[in-house]
Image (cartoon, rainbow, N blue to C red):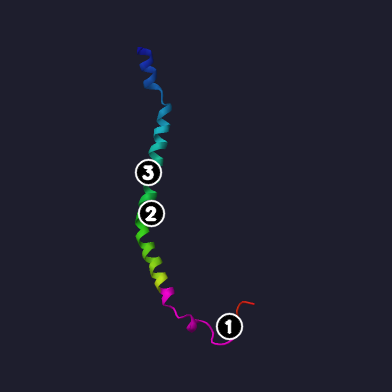
Amino acid sequence: MIKFIKNFRKDEDGAVTVDWVVLTAAVVGLGVAAYAAIEGETTQLSADIAATIESENVAAVAPAAGVSGGD
């Protein structure tokens, strides 16, 4: 039993797995933090773009004459 405990303490196979789990958790955490940081601003930007597009007068942008139907 003592030999088993000594071998168990020396065995480092699981240490690499723990390192990868911690590293993966850190990367996921950074991704969530980045998403949280830009999510509000992108929502506001898309609302601003939608408002600008809706407020544009198409007749003022298109030429008065010579507009064809896409032939």
CA separation, marks 3 and 2? 14 Å
Q: Which residue is mark 2?
A: 35
Eyeballing the image, is 10 above or below 43? above
Q: Residue at x 36, y 12 (%)?
A: 1
Q: CA distance from mark 1 to mark 3?
A: 56 Å
Q: Where is the C terminus found, in terms of image quarters?
A: bottom right
Query: How busy is the neighbourhood of tag 3: few (under 14 within 10 Å), some, or many (20 plus)?
Result: few
Amino acid carrying mark 2 in the image: Tyr
Dot 1 surroundings within 10 Å: few (below 14), some, or many (20 or more)? few
How far from the left and from the top, in percent, is residue 2?
Answer: 35, 12
Q: Is residue 66 magenta?
A: yes
Q: Quadrant of residue 18?
A: top left
Among numbered discs 2 and 1, the one appearing first in the sequence: 2
Farthest residue, direction top: 1
Examine the image and state in which quarter residue 64 appears. bottom right
Instruction: Residue at 41% x, 66% y: name it.
Output: 46
> Tags 3 and 2 in contact by the CB under 8 Å rule?
no
Secondary-structure class at tag 1? loop
Instruction: Determine if the magenta segment contains residue 55.
Output: yes
Q: Amino acid at mark 1?
A: Val
> Circle 3 — which element?
helix
Mark 2 and mark 1: span between their CA atoms? 44 Å
Q: Name the kind of residue labelled 3 in the image.
A: Ala
The residue at the point 41 percent across, 41 percent down is: 24
Q: x, y percentage for residue 38?
A: 37, 58
Depth check: give the residue in front, 68 or 11: 68
